[in-house]
Image: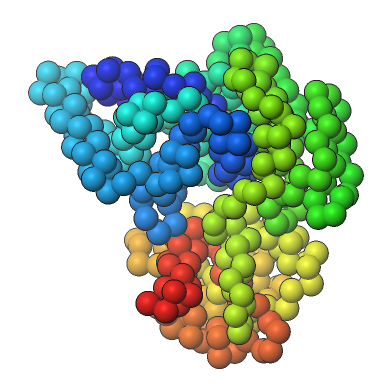
Amino acid sequence: MTLLVRELGHPDRSFKSILVAGTNGKGSVSAYLDEALRYADLKVGRYTSPHLIDIRERMTVSGRNIGNAEFNRFVLEVSDAAERLLVRGEIAAHPNHFEILTAVAFLYFRKCAVDVAVLEVGLGGRLDATNVSSPLVSTIVSIDFDHEEYLGSTLADIAREKAGVIRRGRSVVLGPMEAEAERAILATARSKRAQVVSAMNGVSLRPAHPGLHVKTPLGRYKNVVPLPGAHQRINLVVAIRSLEALAQAGVRLNLEGAVAAMSRTRWPGRLERFEGRPAFLLDGAHNEAGARALAEYLKETGTSHVLVFGAMRDKHVREMALQLFPRARIVIATRVRMRRAATTEQLSQIGQGLGQTVVEEKSISGALTRAKRLARPGETVVVAGSLYLVGAVRKRLLLQRTGR
């Protein structure tokens, strides 16, 4: 990736940036930051992954997806650069899918002359394609078990990989995490003489209608409305502390107004509700921590629901099911058309092991039809377990909403 951006003329150096890593919550924090920085009259690029419906969702400027023509042009430019490197023998293999998309985002942000880019780390941190950037601030939202085959089998191992986003002498904002993970990150921060901001230290939250009054060591912010779910209160604070760190690093903004703008944040596919008969609640809970957060939300709201569940088999599927299956009146297992996807038979067996009867529907359309038929008046259909599943369902619901 370093050689690729060099071949492209280092588009990664054409803008200021913040790098957002973590097991869960990094997309939400990126969305909060994007909204806040745009309020400050900055031209903001945002790079996130994965997408739900259209790959162009991954790279936005001023809240708008990259256009088709520009996307295709930059993909060709990156591919040509990679071919030159291959011919010269400077790289042994063609860049992977994520590396190409990251380079495309950098080229797009340079072309649009963005002031600052919010870059969500794809996997880990140390070896992620986004880590070629030189962020003013790095943020590590959370550490939990996910992608152990790449990141390591302990929280400390995973934390060390994610700590690769820390830059020498710059600030790193840390969300709350287990002591084992925090110790590993603090060791890296000390070695790089980075300034550590523990996001929740010295912070108080007071309920306000309809949001929260947030007090940090650097400011007071009135009635900020987080995204739905108790876990989003923490993500909101992490985003606020990251914004404060950006201001201290020289990004000019009105903190009070920028934080207030976070109330406008929308993040599709994360506790996203579609009203109807029945209503649908979509949440991309795709690992154990995400499933736990969704289960807590459902418990808090007392939502009676039918669960449509599909997951990737390389995830901790049983642990996810243990969080979600017992809360549902009925569980319908389905799968997206991907090799990684767990089969409905596998999900049903997991359900049986938990003492839960699972209805199998091999197609997503069949699962949705069955869920609508089985949902009682006033019940919600909850769709969870995979962002790929949520994206497929969301596309169908949007088409229904527009009558297409």
Q: Position of residue 7 (x, y in %)?
A: 23, 19
* Residue at 66% from the left image edge and 67% from the top image edge: 324
* Left or right, residue 48 beside residue 90: right
Colouring convention used in this rendered image of the protein: rainbow
- Please report the residue visible at 67 percent of the width from the left and 34 percent of the height from the top: 258
At 61% from the left and 84% from the top, the residue drawn is 277
**Quadrant in the picture for the C terminus:** bottom left
Q: Is residue 241 above or below residue 397?
A: above
Tell me what residue is drawn at x 43 percent, y 38 percent: 61
Which part of the image, by quadrant, shows the N terminus? top left
Residue 163, x across and y down, in percent: 58, 25
Residue positioned most to the left: 87
Residue 12 at least partly seen? yes
Residue 243 percent coordinates (x, y): 66, 29
- Out of 321 and 132, give the one closest to the viewer: 132
Left or right: where does residue 213 sit relative to residue 267? right
Q: Quadrant of residue 228?
A: bottom right
Observer-nearest of 220 and 171:
220
- Residue 146 location, x and y as percent? 55, 45
Seen from the viewer's position, the closer of residues 108 and 331 is 108
Left or right of 218: which side holds 273?
Answer: left
Depth check, front residue: 347 or 12: 12
